[in-house]
Amino acid sequence: MRIATLPWKLPWKLSIAAAAFLLGSAPSFAQTRPDTENGRYALSPAGDGGVLRLDTKTGTVSTCTNSGAGWACYAVPDERAALDAEIGRLQAENEKLKAQLAEREGPVAGKSEDALPKSDSLRKPEPKVAEGERKIEIPLPSDQDMDRVMSFLERAWRRLIEMANRIQKDVSGGKI
């Protein structure tokens, strides 16, 4: 793999690997290449005639090329630093928005931090056990509940009979 073909946005692990490589190999370069300033920079040749420069004090990696007018170095974007900066910005913004929301709402009347009792008004009553006996009393459905069930069953039965009659007519009439 050639270093010159890597994309501009190097993953932070690759940046660390490149830094380790650059620190391990400190070859001497020709006079036209950038000076290493008393060991501050570690240089490594790149495939396009330029060099990769590692700043040993800050850890910044740059690509340096000779463009006819002289050498120019451009810092390689560090994704990890940008990601950390964005996370910090979003956390600060989140805290600011929470504070603004709390300020707008103020204390809510009737709001309590205490847990509410666990009761369900739609729940059926528990079967009662008579004292001294082991009999369980089960509440029976009301007459209104029974009428609703019977009405439903009657309608379902009539629809079933009507459907059977239609099928019988279709079969005897040769439609099926």
Image (cartoon, grey):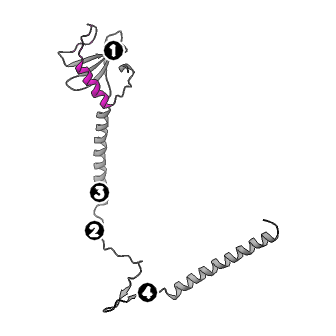
Residue situated in front as seen by the camera: 72 or 3: 3
Which part of the image, by quadrant, shows the C terminus? bottom right
The residue type indicated by label 1 comes to: Gly
* Element on which disc 2 rests: loop
Q: Is residue 139 magenta?
A: no
Point out the frontmost of discs 1 and 3.
Answer: 1
**Res 55 → quadrant:** top left
Q: Residues within 10 Å of mark 3 (few under 14, many from 20)?
A: few
Tag 2 near tag 1, CB within 8 Å = no
Point out the frontmost of discs 2 and 4.
Answer: 4
Q: Residues within 10 Å of mark 2 (few under 14, many from 20)?
A: few
User: Which residue is disc 3 drawn over?
Assistant: 102
The residue type indicated by label 2 comes to: Ser
**Res 128 → quadrant:** bottom left
- Report the magenta residues as a range: 10-37
Looking at the image, residue 157 sits to the left or right of residue 110; the answer is right
User: Which residue is disc 1 drawn over?
Assistant: 50
Q: In the rendering, at what x and y percent does residue 104 appear?
A: 31, 57
Q: In the rendering, at what x and y percent does residue 38 appear?
A: 17, 15
* Element on which disc 1 rests: loop
User: Which residue is disc 2 drawn over?
Assistant: 112
The residue type indicated by label 4 comes to: Pro
User: Which residue is disc 4 drawn over?
Assistant: 139
